[in-house]
Image: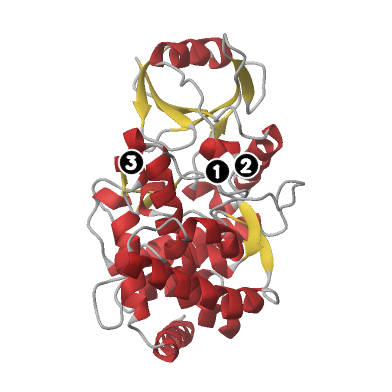
Amino acid sequence: MNAPTPPVCSQVFSGHAPPLSNNQAMEIARKAYGIHATVQLLSSERDQNFKLQTIDGRAYVLKATHPAEDPAITDFQTRAQLHLQTTEAQQFIPHLYPSTDGHHQCTHYSATGERRAIRLIDFSPGIPMSQAPRSARQRQAIGVALASVDLGLQGFEHPMADHVLLWDIQHTDRIAHLVELIKAPERKRQAQRFLEHFLMHTQPALAGLRRQVIHSDLNPDNIMVDRQNSDRIDMLLDFGDMVRAPLVQDVSVACAYHLCDATNPLLEGVVPLLTGYHQRLALTTEEIALVPELIAARLLITVAITGWRAMQYPENQTYILRNHELAWRGLGLLDALPAAQAQDSLLQACEHARKSQP
């Protein structure tokens, strides 16, 4: 029997919808964008993404939203991306192309009435960071790229910026129902401890921090790096989790995927990314001190949501659980690291990075 759907989960996560076929995507590309291309379905969780390859060698991605997604949220993401195309951050994001009638998103209705928003963006010639070698220089470049995006989003406003999103770590309390679904007793107790700490300490501390619209999901599959030089960032992808949140939440989400198996798991991977970000967009002492706790919150949300999602959709569990065990391993590493040591290591690294700037 399927696990119950918590009240905070939207239909975008829990609803079923007949997928578009490659032939349908090919026809949409032809009619809406005047593009004649071969089509390849790409991996995704909520939306559908299709690679379009034209005879003259150009490549695009046709994005089709889940039918349950609120059109106003799609508009939020589209307008944010168009705004970023007018800033210095444009070098790090895929270009959004208009349809033949000049709109940057169009609508497709299936024969059974499902409504999907359609967008066309650049296809990155790079490879996902998850498939590339890691290095300190690469992590620093990720920090710089993300800071550039956050600088570009400063002042951006939209009526849907505060929409409810299950992955939004400022509201980690909303996944309490999912923590209760964890079956392994020891893991469940560990998750409950992290959730209790978030509720008592992290969430109250977030209240006084600066807020803005952020990317909110810079995981390794959303970072494309150059094929010949994996230290170079080619493109940051997927604006589907954008929300207004504490600024430091954005870099903390990114850092959650760079813990290393060491006594202090922050030093080798998190420090280069965080200091790269800090040198481009300076964080306050209060923000830096919260990074370890926000990393833990992201990992907690990851194990809770992906575990629940895999129960709901066992046919797609390989994709859903791709970061599941890594997140559990990260929670274990943070559990063993004294909080004061975690904070001090990041504060000292950021102070050193600030002083070494030319």
Q: Residues within 10 Å of mark 3 (few under 14, many from 20)?
A: some
Q: Position of residue 82 (x, y in %)?
A: 63, 40
- In the rendered view, tell whether residue 63 sits above or below residue 192: above
Residue 224 visible somewhere in the drawing: yes
**Mark 1 and mark 2 residues within 8 Å of each other at the beta carbon:** yes
Q: Which mark is residue 240?
A: 1
Left or right of 217 in this view: 260: left
Q: N-terminal of the two: label 2 or label 3?
A: 2
The residue positioned 33% from the left and 54% from the top of the image is: 323
What amino acid type is highlighted by mark number 1?
Gly
What amino acid type is highlighted by mark number 2?
Gln
Q: Position of residue 294 (x, y in %)?
A: 50, 71
Q: Residues within 10 Å of mark 2 (few under 14, many from 20)?
A: many
Closer to the observer: label 1 or label 3? 3
Q: Which mark is residue 317?
A: 3
The residue positioned 77% from the left and 46% from the top of the image is: 159
Colouring style: secondary structure
Q: Which mark is residue 77?
A: 2
Q: Secondary structure at mark 2?
A: helix
Residue 258 visible somewhere in the drawing: no
What amino acid type is highlighted by mark number 3?
Gln
- In the rendered view, tell whether residue 23 sits above or below residue 275: above
Left or right of 315 in this view: 19: right
Quarter occupied by the N terminus: top left
